[in-house]
Structure formats: structure tokens, C-alpha cells
Image (cartoon, helix red, strand yellow):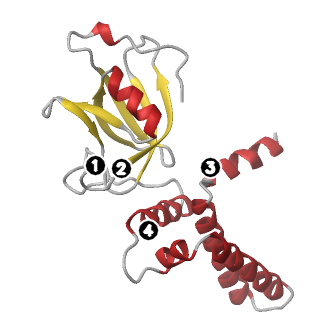
Amino acid sequence: MALPQSPDFDKMSDGLVPAIVQDAQTAAVLMLGYMNAAALQQTQETGLVTFFSRSKQRLWTKGEESGNVLRLRSIALDCDNDTLLIQAEPAGPVCHTGADTCWNQPNIAPDFLHQLENIILQRRATAPEGSYTAQLFAAGIPKMAQKVGEEAVETVIEALGDNRDRLLNESADLLYHLLVLFAAKEIRLHEVEHVLLSRHK
């Protein structure tokens, strides 16, 4: 994921530039870190957001111990070439305190479908015991696709009937299983929204 030009790492005496991390889905600001040229390169090569830790005095990949990594989605450089805006997908709480963000603010999605998408991504990353979502990921894409097909058929059947509650429940099942399949195929809800928006325009 290349930038049009490199940050001006020489602007600061320590060779670091601030990197603001934003949730690619919710737009919430998650944390602030610092990058040198090596940290930026490792972030771009691995797809995992990596900083230069001023306390450890080494490169530090967020979540390297906790597993709560930040998966890179985009990088932007500001107009002065000295600050990075990183959009990423968090695999869990970002702050070492267990909070969603380093400002102890909830990482709230703009609507529940996006919030549900984040929950599904967390289940994929952590695979908690007894989680139906984790079981679907373990079963693989063919099983997920089969479930989408089954729920689609059941939704159609209920649409031909008169029971509104059953139609609502089958529709909810369909949306849920579709989001699980999206997560497995590395498709995000906002990408589908962009397709719909482009068609609307």
C-alpha cells in the first residue's frame, strides 16, 4: 500500500511522525502512535499496524502480545507530510486497559449492522468456545455459503406467506449469515454500500 510520497521523517529530531489510527468501519479515533521509516515499511509489508515504541526503543506491532492487532486498510499523509492517518480494523480492544479506544470511549458503529460486523470479526479473531459464529468460521466457506443459501430459501418461503414475524426472523438470519460470509471473504459492509451508492448516482 504505497503512498504518493514519503513522510518527512527528518522534520522531527527523533525521526518519528505521529500516526493517528482510525477504525475503518466506525471512523472512531482509536489511538495515537509514532512511526519511523522502518515502522511504516513493516506496516505496509505485513498489513499489521506497527509503530516505533519510544519506551521500548524498538519496532512494536500493535497486539503482538495481546492478539488485538490492527489490520491495515489505508494510509493517508497530511498536507504538511508529517502526520499519518491510518485506517485499520481492530481485532479487539485497542487500549491496554481493555477499553475500545485510548480515550476510554466506546467504538460505536453508526448502525447496528456495522456493530454486528465488528462483533463477527472479533469472533473470527478470538474464536471463543461455544460461539456459533466461531464454529461457522471453523467449518469453512462452503458451509457458510450453504447457510446463506438455506436462509435465502427460507426467507423466500416466508415472503410468500402471511406470517410477518417469521419473515422478519428469516431475514435476520439471512443478513447475519451473509455478514459472516463477507468476513470470511474479506468483504466489508461499507464496500457493498459503496457499490449501491455508485448505482444510485
Residue at which label 1 appears:
64
Find residue 69 and name its label: 2
In the rendered image, which quarter contains the N terminus? top right
Residue at which label 3 appears:
190
Amino acid of disc 2: Val
Spatial CA distance of label 4 from label 2 is 14 Å
Find residue 123 and name its label: 4
Task: Name which of mark 4 and mark 1 comes first in the sequence.
Answer: 1
Element marked by disc 4:
helix
Element marked by disc 2:
loop
- How busy is the neighbourhood of tag 2: few (under 14 within 10 Å), some, or many (20 plus)? many
- Give left or right: position of 102 versus 70: left
- Give left or right: position of 99 versus 165: left
> Which residue is rendered at x = 63% and y = 66% of the image?
181
Spatial CA distance of label 2 from label 3 is 21 Å
> Which residue is rendered at x = 61% and y = 65% of the image?
179
